[in-house]
Amino acid sequence: MPKVVVGLSGGVDSSVAAYLLKEQGYDVIALFMINWHDTTGTLAGDCPWHDDLVFARLVAQKLDIPFHTTDLSEPYRNRVVEYMFSEYEKGRTPNPDVLCNREIKFDMFIEEALKLGADYTATGHYCKKKETSINGRTIYRLLAGDDPGKDQSYFLCQLNQKQLSKALFPLGNLDKKKVRDIAGETELPSAQKKDSQGICFVGKVDLPLFLQQKLQPRRGDIIEIPSGFYRHIPAVGGLPQNRADLDYLCNPVVYRPDDGIKTGSHNGAWFYTVGQRKGLNVGGKKEPLFVIATDIEKNIVYAGEGHSHGGLNRRGLFIKPGDIHWIRDDLRLDPGQQSDFLVRIRYRQPLQKARLYMENKGLYIVFDNPQRGIAAGQFAAWYRDDELVGSGIID
């Protein structure tokens, strides 16, 4: 009987995952991760791990499965939170949930599970894994979950073949309602528990306050860029013909203070990201202001008025060679090659048609249509149909 260690978080998804695996005949063990102790910047009452621990223990008792805990807070701070601070300090927008999966849930957690004799590990992610064989080699495919509203494959875009070889995703064929129904029918203690929100294992936070653990407030100017300033971006089509076209479409606009007018002030450019509206606190405008760029060195936030401001949109993005990751190495593009994929740059964004251009300099992604709020530090993930093939960190 294969032994599987389930990351039991105390939530309904991982609880139902454990239940389903036991029903399928696996020897199931529950392992609860303690990854965060600090409450600085955490909104009151949100995602306290000690409450989650109580729910997880009750679920394990209900399912009559062994229950263990492990404290991974030190590697979580070093690998995820410190990375997050470092990225914001550079004016970039990290995704700690993607890093948490790559560095903790499918790395450190697997190591702990192996100590318990695991053949596999399992989580409550809404995605699927399938196997195929190419030239006698087993290839693990990461597929979107059947519930389009809950598909979480994007959060796993940095996993590798070794990590996937050990992973099971029992919820991939289910929608959220069915998972809730199963939890209710089997009277799992977590059946009515609300889904967690915010940063993985930290919870919902006041981001500026959270970041002030490392990044100090600095008064600076908000410069409003007129709507007619931004360079012309082809609305649809117009595929690039050369490297100059690629650079033009994929590199962000660099603004200067005299390109606009001072319209307000802020407490630190590193607390803002492209597309952000909340926190600018500038009144007297017909339409709201949105962040279109930041200059960390000069501590300037550039903003544009209205949802249609061209500074919010770009046709493409660029990824440096060292930041390109292929889940399917057999589908890797070599320099000089190009291919069409479906791409998203954030969780739950509908997949967008795009063409990938691999060059010695790095990977260019050009979308059929302009994309809103492309920010350095985000993860772009590319798919073939419903299979996640690769990802990279936007430069």
Image (cartoon, rainbow, N blue to C red):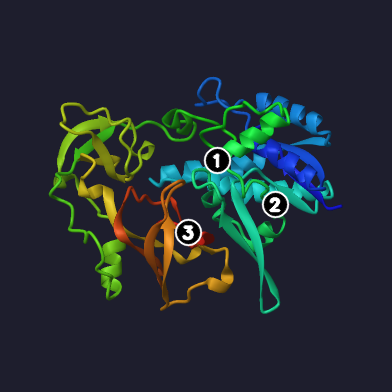
Check disc 1 and give the amino acid type: Val
Left or right of 365, for residue 325 = right
Check disc 2 and give the amino acid type: Leu
Check disc 3 and give the amino acid type: Gly
Label drawn at residue 392:
3
- Earlier-in-chain disc, 2 versus 3: 2
Packing grade of label 3 (10 A; few <14, some 14-19, many >=20) is many
How far is disc 1 from disc 3 in space, using C-alphas? 19 Å
Q: Quadrant of the C terminus?
A: bottom left
- Earlier-in-chain disc, 1 versus 3: 1
How far is disc 2 from disc 1 in space, using C-alphas? 26 Å
Q: How many marks?
A: 3
Please provide percent x and percent y for residue 159.
60, 56
Please provide percent x and percent y for residue 306.
21, 39
- Earlier-in-chain disc, 2 versus 1: 1
Tag 2, which secondary structure?
A: strand
Query: Mark 2 highlights which residue?
Result: 168
Viewer-nearest residue: 168 or 79: 168
Query: Mark 1 highlights which residue?
Result: 81
Packing grade of label 1 (10 A; few <14, some 14-19, many >=20) is many
